[in-house]
Image (cartoon, helix red, strand yellow):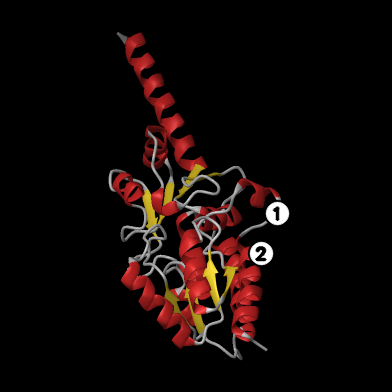
Amino acid sequence: MRRAVTLLALLVLAGCGASDKNDSDTVVAAFYPLAWAAEQIVAEGTEVVNLTPPGAEPHDVELSPRDGETIREARVVLYAGGGFQPAVEDVVSERSGISLNVLQNGGDPHVWLDPVRFAQVVIDIGGVVERPKRAAELADELAQLHASYRRGLGRCERRTLVTSHAAFSQLADRYGLTQLSLTGISPEAEPGPRVLEQLIDDVRASGATTVFAEPLVSDRVAQTVAREAGADVAVLDPLEGLSDDRLADGEDYLSVMRTNLAVLREALGCR
């Protein structure tokens, strides 16, 4: 009997040890910008798991049973609520650990495209992973990025941003631009013929000379509107995910945001 109790105690302790290790070593991020921020902040040896595969569209992510288990067992989960990734939200609702919704106030989920708001997200991540000092350092880098955008977009001939989908309202609001999107929050939606005609008229009336397409979705609508409105097409990256090739080439959140700024300055005629 004594031996059985001892064996049971050892099994319980072993089980607790395995659970503690899992909890202490894994941070799950729902998509690339959150994974990038977590990787910059967490302590060495902490595993960061990005639920959205490289080059995939996070709106359409489908979770495997293993993904679900990873979410449930992680020490921390970072995600955007409000229906941005319903599959992720469903599993997060089942877990008891720490889960950080970076979109607690609702609205456009693309908070990472506004360096000021993303800096606050970074601070919040630093709090839940208990690395506030490193988070503050990363927030300082984002403040520098914000200063570059503020200077770079301060004096422009045009201030209308024609985008493939409504991902850039946070950025537009921050820097005094007007977003004119060809589709809504989901990039997969396509406008019908009458809406398309109205969009072409709106682009012409805005004086915009560029329609922005995206790397991860078809540019068919952007090309059509640009052709009919007499505008050019350029790529503006909403940073929802980077492909393996781009990651291998050393691209990351900061480098893509700087490229976006250069593209915007050219398209908007900024001085």
Residue 63, quarter of picture = top left
Going by the numbered disc 1, the residue's amino acid type is: Gly
Asked whether 98 or 143 is in front, the reply is 143
- At numbered mark 2, what does the secondary structure look like: helix, strand or loop? helix
- At numbered mark 1, what does the secondary structure look like: helix, strand or loop? loop
Q: Is 162 situated left or right of 268 in this image?
A: left
Q: Which residue lies under the disc numbered 1? A: 250
Q: x, y (%) of residue 236?
A: 56, 68
Q: x, y (%) of residue 258?
A: 65, 70
Assess disc 1: are there few (<14), some (14-19) or many (≥20) residues with their C-alpha within 10 Å of its C-alpha: few
Residue 193, quarter of picture = bottom left
Location of residue 96 with respect to 82 vertically, above or below? above
Assess disc 2: are there few (<14), some (14-19) or many (≥20) residues with their C-alpha within 10 Å of its C-alpha: few
Q: Is 133 situated left or right of 66 in this image?
A: right
**Could you tell me which quadrant the N terminus lies in?**
top left
Spot the residue most to the right: 249
Asked whether 30 or 37 is in front, the reply is 30
Residue under the point 46% across and 52% down: 57
Going by the numbered disc 2, the residue's amino acid type is: Ser
Q: x, y (%) of residue 113?
A: 51, 69
Residue 105 visible in the shown view: no
Residue 268, quarter of picture = bottom right
Asked whether 131 or 199 is in front, the reply is 199
Q: x, y (%) of residue 23?
A: 45, 40
The disc label shown at residue 208, or none: none
Location of residue 161 with respect to 75 vertically, above or below? below
Badge 1 vs badge 2, beta-carbon distance below 8 Å: yes
Q: Which residue lies under the disc numbered 2? A: 255
Q: Is 74 situated left or right of 252 in this image?
A: left
Residue 122 visible in the shown view: yes
How far apart marks 1 and 2 lie (CA) works out to: 9 Å
